[in-house]
Image (cartoon, rainbow, N blue to C red):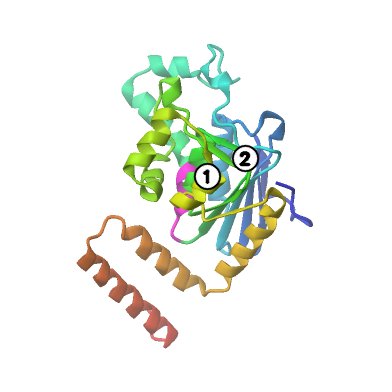
Amino acid sequence: MASPAHEPAPVLDKDGVRLTVDDAIATVTLTNAAKRNAQSPALWRALTDAGRLLPGSVRVVVLRAEGKSFSAGLDRQAFTPEGFDGEPSFIDLARGGDAELDATITEYQEAFTWWRRSDILSVAAVQGHAIGAGFQLALACDLRVVADDVQFAMRETSLGLVPDLTGTHPLVSLVGYARALEICATGRFVTAEEAVNTGLANLAVPADQLDGAVRDLVSAVLAAPRDAVIETKALLQGAQTRDYETQRAAERAAQARRLRDLAGLGE
């Protein structure tokens, strides 16, 4: 995906992650195209920092990647005895206690959790390969716009592991249990056409139109009042766990808040 013209000065630019902010729009870019944006603990910490650095003015966060691939997944160096410089190798982590291992994976997951915060809407612009951790990072966002060359794959099971970077919940919610299980167990590629047909992606476009399609979507989101979008997002997120009557009550309560705000009677 090409870099946008006149991109603002970075708020953060380290370890393969760049954050820029332009008023209501923040852009998080994976910048290690030479390694197909392979992921590491340092990259995950940078993603976590990007979430913490978002100013209150931001309404939409766009996640994008430089190069031909969105992200080829976990850097295979993680599986070597040496691991990454200054980091415990995965072999060392496996030898540690349960509490230590749980705390480490929890820290890694933080890079994938903030994208669904109630006060923002996140959009992943995905081209080329989005494999393993790359697939899960795309799944972390609220919406996905994909290039017609996209190839999603969940390869963790093929490596004897499980998807543990928060991807299982949104995958099942989007495509259903049976298809999610089949995608994970086989590690096969999911193309743009299947992604759109199953709800995994909101829209697929030719690769050279990806930037424009994302801009159009972001503009449409920003055209609606912020508080209404926030309330609607919360309603839809909660619908996954509420029963019908509880959801009806949540709709009434949310609408009452909106009407009072519009009438100038809010708290």
Q: Quadrant of residue 74?
A: top right
Residue 10, image x and y in percent?
Answer: 71, 49
User: What secondary structure characterizes most of the magenta part?
Assistant: helix
Q: Quadrant of residue 165?
A: top left
Residue at 44%, 38% in the rendered image: 109
Looking at the image, which residue is at 51% across and 59% down?
121
Do the CB atoms of the residues marked 2 and 1 lie less than 8 Å apart?
Answer: yes
Q: Which residue was labeled with disc 2?
A: 70
Where does the magenta region start and end?
112-118
- Residue 192 x, y percent position in the rendering: 56, 46
Left-right relation of 96 to 43: left
Neighbour tally class for label 2: few under 14, some 14-19, many 20 plus, Cα within 10 Å? many
> Residue at 38% across / 83% down in the picture?
259
All told, the count of numbered labels is 2
Q: Position of residue 16 (x, y in %)?
A: 66, 36
Task: Say which of 203 and 34 sits in front.
Answer: 203
Hey, what amino acid is under mark 2?
A: Phe
Q: Residues within 10 Å of mark 1 (few under 14, many from 20)?
A: many
| Residue at the bottom extreme, as displayed | 263
Tell me the number on the disc at residue 138.
1
Q: Work out which quarter of the rendered image holds the C terminus and state it.
A: bottom left
Q: Which mark is residue 126?
A: none
- Report the amino acid beneath label 1: Ala
Q: Residue at x 50, y 32 (%)?
A: 132
Which secondary structure, mark 1?
helix
Is 264 colored magenta in this rendering? no
Q: Is 135 rendered above or below residue 256? A: above
The image shows residue 38 at horizontal and vertical percentages of 61, 30
Q: Secondary structure at mark 2?
A: loop
* Residue 254 seen in this snapshot: yes
For marks 2 and 1 on the same chain, the one whose residue lies earlier in the sequence: 2
